[in-house]
Image (cartoon, grey):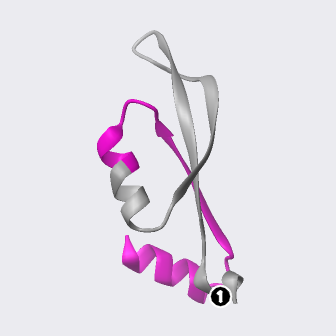
Amino acid sequence: MAALIDAAEAAGFWKLVSHVLVENSASRVLLHTVGFREAGIYRRHAKLAGEWKDVVIVERRLDAAQR
């Protein structure tokens, strides 16, 4: 994850954004530990095994953007 963040910053990106299923607590914890914050929730955004799932939107501003 650190390599991805470093590469994105070196390429001039100012923010990383991702989507995670609400029930995927392990991914949510991991993303939080590397500086992502939860920005919102898409309700009934993804259909998995015939069931609609809510998705958490996460984002991380990169260091260069915070300077």
Quadrant (top left/top right/bottom left/bottom right) for the N terminus? bottom left
Q: Position of residue 41 (x, y in %)?
A: 61, 34
Q: Residues within 10 Å of mark 1 (few under 14, many from 20)?
A: few
Judging by the rendered image, the residue that carries numbered circle 1 is: 64
Residue found at x 35% / y 51%: 29
Residue 31 vertical position relative to residue 23 in the rendered view, above or below: below
Residue found at x 34% / y 39%: 25
SS for callout 1: helix
The question of residue 15 being in magenta is answered with yes
The residue at the far top in this view is 50
Q: Position of residue 9 (x, y in %)?
A: 58, 83
In the picture provided, is 20 more to the left or to the right than 44? left
* Amino acid identity at mark 1: Ala
Q: Position of residue 22 (x, y in %)?
A: 45, 32
In the picture provided, is 26 more to the left or to the right than 46? left
User: Which segment is the magenta one?
Assistant: 1-28
Q: Position of residue 21 (x, y in %)?
A: 45, 34
Front residue of 5/67: it is 67
Q: Quadrant of residue 45?
A: top right
Residue found at x 54% / y 56%: 37
Q: Quadrant of residue 49?
A: top left
Quadrant (top left/top right/bottom left/bottom right) for the C terminus? bottom right
The question of residue 6 being in magenta is answered with yes
Residue 38 vertical position relative to residue 7 in the rendered view, above or below: above
Front residue of 41/52: it is 41
